[in-house]
Amino acid sequence: MTHNATVAVRTQQDDPGQPEQQAPSKLRAAGRQFGVVWSNTKARVGIIILAFFVLVAIFAPLLAPYGGSQNGFERNGDASWAHWMGTTAAGEDVLSQLIYGARVSVLVGAVAGFLSTLVAVAIGLSWGYIRGWVAEVIGFIVNLFLVIPGLPLMIVIAAYLQNGGIAVIIAVIVVTGWAWGARVLRSQTQSLRSRDFVTAAQFSGDGATRIVFREILPNMTSLIVGSFFGAATSAILAEAGLEFLGLGDSSIVSWGTILYWAQNSNALLTGQWILLFAPGLCIALLAMSLTLINFGVDAVSNPRLREGARRKRKEVSA
Amino acid sequence: MSGAPTHTADGLEARGGADPRLPSDGSDVLLDVRDLSVVYESAGQTAVQAVDHVSFQLRKGEFVGLVGESGSGKSTLGYALTRLQKPPARTNGGHIFFAGADIRDLDDEALRRQRQGGFAMVLQSGMNALNPVRTIRNHFIDVFKAHGHVPRDRWDARMKELVAKVKLPETMLARYPGELSGGMRQRVSIALALSLEPQLMVFDEPTTALDVLVQHAVMDTIIELQKEEGFTAVLISHDLGIVLEATERVLVMHEGRIVEDNDSRSILRDPQDEYTQMLLSHYADPRAEVVSLPGFPDRSQRDASATRQETTSSFSTVGSRERSAAKNPIVVANLVKTYPAPRRGEQPVQAVRDVSFTLEPGQSLALVGQSGSGKSTIAKMLTGVEQPTSGTVRFGDTDVAKLGRRGLKDLRSEVQMVFQDPYAALNPLHTVEYILTRPVLNYTGLRGKDARRRVLELLETVGLTPVEQFAQKLPHQLSGGQRQRVVIARALASDPQVIIADEPVSMLDVTLRAGVLALLEDLREQWGVSLLYITHDLLSARLITDDIMVLHNGEVVERGRTAEVLQHPQDPYTVDLLDAVPNPRRALAEGRL
């Protein structure tokens, strides 16, 4: 994946004359990477959808016509000018609930995704760099988490911790969700650790921690970002799933709880299909937006996937 | 399928000579390139004109070399000729007439058909282009099916004929690519290209990725094939020596332009362009009495000219350097390294067998051999990266194999390494300053301003000036030669006694090699470090080492003073290695040109 930097340059300048450009700032580099993601059509659609949901979540109090848990309206009301999507069995405005529900999904996606990526990075990188029996032990634990079916484990843990609110849900998702990312990052670490520049850092007297986090980690940024989006996607889906099963705190307003209450009040039988359809669609769209962004992130780590920008490798090092 | 042949028919009619664009004397001209320009346009970067208004003609049956250093546009031109180029490369001007028709006008299907009986290309990495899960036979069948130019009942016979042409046994057809060596696979890809009966073959660095001795054999096969089959061939290479030995006519490319186009003999005897003269000046025969390259007087005369030491270097660091003159020898005794068998039922790999030598303080010793001869494994054991199976490596009083993590760090402050590939040895994300600061902080105890001053001194020592500017650069902003200087500067940061250089110039262009070698040589003389120089290139060994050891299959087959061994080689293996050094003038001397 780090080939992109080296490959891009090998095709050019080998003249001893000095290339004019200065070392770009970190911000500029990040901006360029974003440009690569943005240039991918799929990723662009994803970014727009994600930005929409994030803005909705942030400005929910301004956008929503009523409060999220404000009840006392007509029960099971159909769509009307006052309530565009009707009201729930408890007499709450569905549209407002949907808008406030975005907050939970976005928050859980970001926080749980971030935390499980953090765990994955810490474990994946050390697992990839260390050799010997310690690596075997880590491998055993990771494989254990991989073979246990995720959803049942989540249900068991969530049921055991009972109604702990969002924090517990996030914890459950992190515990069950880091293993796959760790595995992916480990294999990349293993391939990077045999590079000459890592050996060279050893010859420079750098310690293992520094080599892992200063030499290897920056070379897999895009993979980590990709792994974050993947983790966030599954976190959003898992959160909605747990809420739907009633394992979260059913008093908070989230897309999962809307589904939970809609199911409880047999919304489909009473003809209020929108109660199931609208949150379901939101969950699907948000998850899809992250997946779409990942297409663009893939292009950062693998220049061959860039649209219309295939690079030719002139000098293939033997 | 039925709609497409008309296109080919058009192409064939144009071939007949009705086209007014044909040169009037073009009866035996196969390829006519006029004002061809190719540009690289990638988003967000300035466009690079890789090929700039190039014009030349190839006559039928000619064998022409295309020479240039990396970045000269030679491969880009090769890809354009065979229409294999991909975005961001784009042809932005000129024409390529192949047998009279402009191939730039061909659509994809016509182009695909043109590949049979038209033009074919053999790539540098062609040996890796074979599908690992299909036998060689299947690869041939794919080609026959795609073009239908061989009747099904002739398939077997044709395949056998083709592999025989590239000097492979028939049994090879049943094998999988993974079971063949690199040289064999490259032969297979040549045979596959040949199966299309092309009129024009473009060889893009066909032997560069192969081992030195194999290179020679494959090149001989290509030369013979071209003579027998009579196809027109273009040999693209960075190595003027190889090209001059093989071809009748040479085009020299520099910065996207053809600077010289002449027959090989004239180029050798009387090169017109400065650039060609400069390229030629970097070849010499390691067997000669006196070997010198530009900036590189012969070793035997060097000691007399002590003035050079004062003139060439004004090391600001000399004062701080006096203590670092090497004191401890590296003593290697009965070193053996055996790797476990790659597959069950096979023999374990004996990489190094019973090697003993001593690297005296301040000595420069060359360790020479082809790939797989065990030379890099020895380097790894000297630096504690690998553990020997038996035998000992001692540096001064320490036994390298018994060192723990702390001990290894201490060892590496005294024994440093220069890596083969300057592109892989520098982390692409760190500035030169960061890369050099690390060993300074870790080994010298300097901090803050002092550390920075030391980094700048190092840059000056390796000749990267202005130092302030270079310190801020990222590796990709440097050329290969500059990168290798950074790698050397890093190795010097800890004031080492010993530098182990593993093929430090094999990835560099010929013209950059001399500079890096001169730097290594200077450092050894000025700083008094011992140098273990690992290489397959006997010419560079002759230039910078006093003593030499020739390794073959993990054993030392010959050792002695470098000049003596190379002038009077005793072992046949040393002779083989010497023969593999490309040297255009030798061909001239032997009357082959």
Image: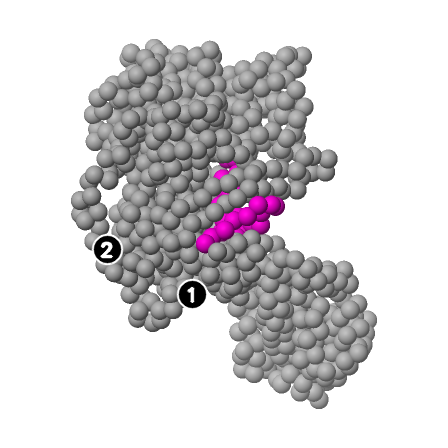
User: Of the residues shown, which amino acid type is indicated by label 1?
Assistant: Asn
- Please state the horizontal and vertical placement of residue A143, each as a whole percent of the image: 73, 60
The residue to which callout 1 is attached is B442
Front position in the image: B507 or B438 = B438
Front position in the image: B460 or A283 = B460
Q: Quadrant of residue B593?
A: top left
- Please state the horizontal and vertical placement of residue B460, each as a whole percent of the image: 26, 56
Query: Which residue lies at the image location 47% right of the left edge and 47% below the top edge?
Result: B331
User: Which chain does the numbered disc 1 sit on?
Assistant: B
Q: Is residue B24 magenta?
A: no
Q: Is residue A209 above or below residue B465?
A: below
Q: Residues within 10 Å of mark 2 (few under 14, many from 20)?
A: some
Q: Residues within 10 Å of mark 1 (few under 14, many from 20)?
A: some
Q: Is residue B383 above or below residue B187?
A: below
User: Which chain does the numbered disc 2 sit on?
Assistant: B
User: Of the residues shown, which amino acid type is indicated by label 2?
Assistant: Phe
Can residue B143 be seen in the rendering of this structure? yes
Q: Which of pointers 1 and 2 lies earlier in the amino acid sequence?
A: 2
Query: Which residue lies at the image location 60% right of the left edge and 20% below the top edge?
Result: B144
The residue to which callout 2 is attached is B315
Q: Quadrant of residue A67?
A: bottom right
Q: Which residues are magenta?
A: B371-396
Asked whether the beta carbons under mark 1 and mark 2 sit within 8 Å of each other, the answer is no
Task: Classify residue A10 as left or right of residue B449.
Answer: right
Front position in the image: A116 or B429 = B429
